[in-house]
Image (spheres, rainbow, N blue to C red):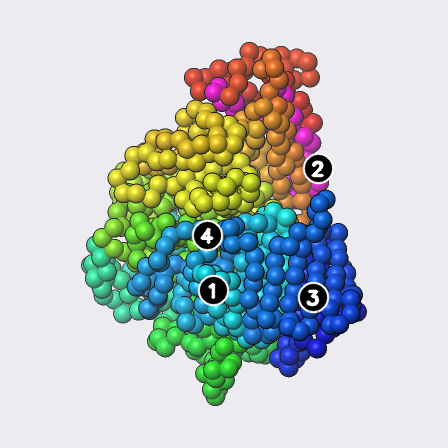
Amino acid sequence: MATETAKFTVRALDANVVALECSNEYTRSKPSFMVTDPVETHAEAESSGAGQWTLRTETLFVEAQESPPRLRIYRTTEKGDDLVCELNDLSPEGASVDIDRGFALYGLGGRSAEKVVRGRGVEPLKSIQLDRRGDVYRIHHRETGQGNNNMPWVLASQGFGLFFDSSFPMTIDLRDRFAVEGKNIRTFYFINGPTTAEALGRFVKLTGLPPMHPAWALGYEQSSRTWMNPGELDFVTTYFREKHIPCDGFVLLSTYGGDGGVGNGRGIHEGYLDLYQGWNVKGTYGTYNPNLLPNGGADIQKLRDQGFHPIVHGYWPADYSDPEATEKVWQDQKYLAEDGFEGWWLDGTESVRVHQNSYISTEHLPEGEKLEMEEFQDEYDNVWAVLRAKAFYEKQRRDFPQRRVYILNRAVFPGAQKYAAGVNQGDYWVSWELMKIQTIWLLNMQMSGIMFPETDIAGHWASEELDQEIFIRWAFMGTFGPLMRSHGHAWRCRLPWGFGPENEARFVPLIRLRSAMFPYNYTLLSQANQQGIPMMRAMAMEFPDDLQAREVWDQFMWGPNMLVAPVYQKGATERQVYLPEGSWVHYWTLESFSGPGTVTVDAPLGRDPLFLKAGSIVPMRQWSDTIPTEADDRLVLLASPAKQEGSFTLYDDDRQTYGYEEGESSQQTFRISAIGDSGSFDLDIGAVEGDHDGVKKAREYRIEIPRSLATVGNASVSGQEVPIESLPDRYVLELDSREGPVRIEFR
């Protein structure tokens, strides 16, 4: 067993994770809400006399002292042990932290405003930056409000993270010091990388790797709010299909009003029909609304027959600390899953305390004052939404064991990701400033372990800034987020055709691009599932040794091979983009650029800067109305040769069930060699390895190579020359259906 002082226990969970476990009456009587799986001891601290202990792993050396309580953590290097972190004044109430303040700090969840009143950011952030240094963070969802999901996790660009395991309110001060003040902190974790990506991955594994979302969740999701009648619902769904606008997730909100009326004057959309019909009878989640769904479950099945995946919205307040109460909620709502709803939007719940609104069902609230007790709220406020997601996730898996869970929360905390919970941005006024803030919110959410956050395309509340320009700029950013979702209070203008034909002509190609990127995107989702690495990555995470990349917040990497640079300025027709070292290909023009350095490129509306990293392969497909449940018969390989070789391993499974947990999945590796002195290079298409429903061992391939990166005279497969088409901006090679391995030689 680990050695325990009068105040704390020090042990290593593996070679890179050190846990300092505090001991008080609360921590001894209650398990962690966030670290729920047993963690074995990798190495134990050994006494060195006089109230001091040491611990050594393959990568770390630790010194612990009883009085005054202190923990020093060193990285083991070839030159000796290098001190990287010191925790002083340790207790379950907090600590002071000494680290090199010259390195940027990330994580801490997501924050959208300094002050939130009734769901609206009424006091803007003091500064817009990815780096968390220079500010103080209150970790209490009840105080900070929706969209401000601060979390007790700090990720240093130096390549390690610190996690403070407590659900109680906490303050982390990163101004002129690094101080943690809270209550009942059961464990202080030091998590080594040595890169930021590796440290984040270990944190996610500690708090729970996310399951695979259903494949359809990577398609386009159309949300709604209130409907006039069933005819309007039929019109919208029919328009999607007749115009071949890809759409998978389709959200039906609960009934907020139901009495009729007009919009209540929010910005330019005063007069929009409002307060009409949602899926349920107002005030209860037990009955379908006959004014919208007169046939009940049959109407939900109709949506599924059209290829949509219905998502149901609600608040579902209950006592989620009580297993019996939780079971009662599920039994009362299970009919929705039985009738064909495939996703849950679990709204609200920044606090144990329930919204006092007539449209929210309170039929599952406990009697008495349990949820009004201050101590109970302090313990559960931050994790209440996690416990609700846990209830829906675990019970759906129990009762529908082969149907993947989709959950969208409005509040999260570490550990929410293991219950398939994504997070919604909250309800904020549309503005160009908010679009900037939401980029940082998305990146830091993912650097806090929440792998499936989303930003409502163009924000929530309509304002004078809501027009087709900001809508399309935001849609481009949303195309490269874990969840591409259009939602807002004035929701009809958030339809692809909401601002008219010109807007539709710009938005639909982005939705189709999202559909076409599915093979690449699904592989990124699997990396989150297996390694805890986010799909949307801060530049600092992919390029940890690039000092300039650490400061960049207004562009990001989509996986390892695509650089995304949204436009955040009204009226802009170009923007500057920082390119790290290497060659980069402009996706829209296939022009090549060299980094490191900043370039200025055109940015017409709907075609914000997007780059492919040279030395990479991006697998794509032909877009379709919905994401298919079987592998594609044909892949498009965007192959970008460079002076260094590159590879990409494509992941797939049955896209619907949890068979992948039993090994039912496939992988296929594509490799591109370095360009030789003569300009020649090879492309290897590996065999599809593994098996699952819908797998395709043989398929056709279209290979596209930018002319700006290489000159190709001919190509051969297995020694036989094959035709290659030379277009103004690319070379194209078509291969008929075949199994790998296949080597293509370009000369």
68 over 238 or under it: above or below: below
Q: CA distance from mark 3 to mark 2?
A: 48 Å
Q: Which mark is residue 131?
A: 4
> The residue under label 3 is which amino acid type?
Ala
> The residue under label 2 is which amino acid type?
Glu
Say which element carries label 2.
Answer: strand
Q: CA distance from mark 4 to mark 3?
A: 30 Å
Point out the tag, 1 or 4, that comes first from the N-terminus.
4
Q: Which mark is residue 689?
A: 2
Q: Which mark is residue 173?
A: 1
The crowding category of the residue bearing disc 2, from other C-alpha atoms within 10 Å (few below 14, some 14 to 19, many at least 20), is some
43 over 718 or under it: above or below: below
- Magenta stretch bounds: 681-708
Point out the tag, 2 or 1, that comes first from the N-terminus.
1
Say which element carries label 1.
Answer: strand
- Residue at 68% x, 13% y is 719
Judged by depth in the image, the label closer to the viewer, 3 or 1, is: 3
> The residue under label 4 is which amino acid type?
Asp
Residue 202 visible to the viewer: no
Residue 330 is left or right of residue 66, and the answer is left
| Whole-percent x, y for residue 342 in the image | 51, 57
| Whole-percent x, y for residue 42 in the image | 76, 60
- Residue at 54% x, 33% y is 618
- Residue at 65% x, 61% y is 72
Point out the tag, 4 or 3, that comes first from the N-terminus.
3
| Whole-percent x, y for residue 27 in the image | 64, 76
Q: CA distance from mark 2 to mark 4?
A: 41 Å
Disc 3 to disc 1: CB gap under 8 Å: no
Q: CA distance from mark 1 to mark 4?
A: 14 Å
Disc 2 to disc 4: CB gap under 8 Å: no
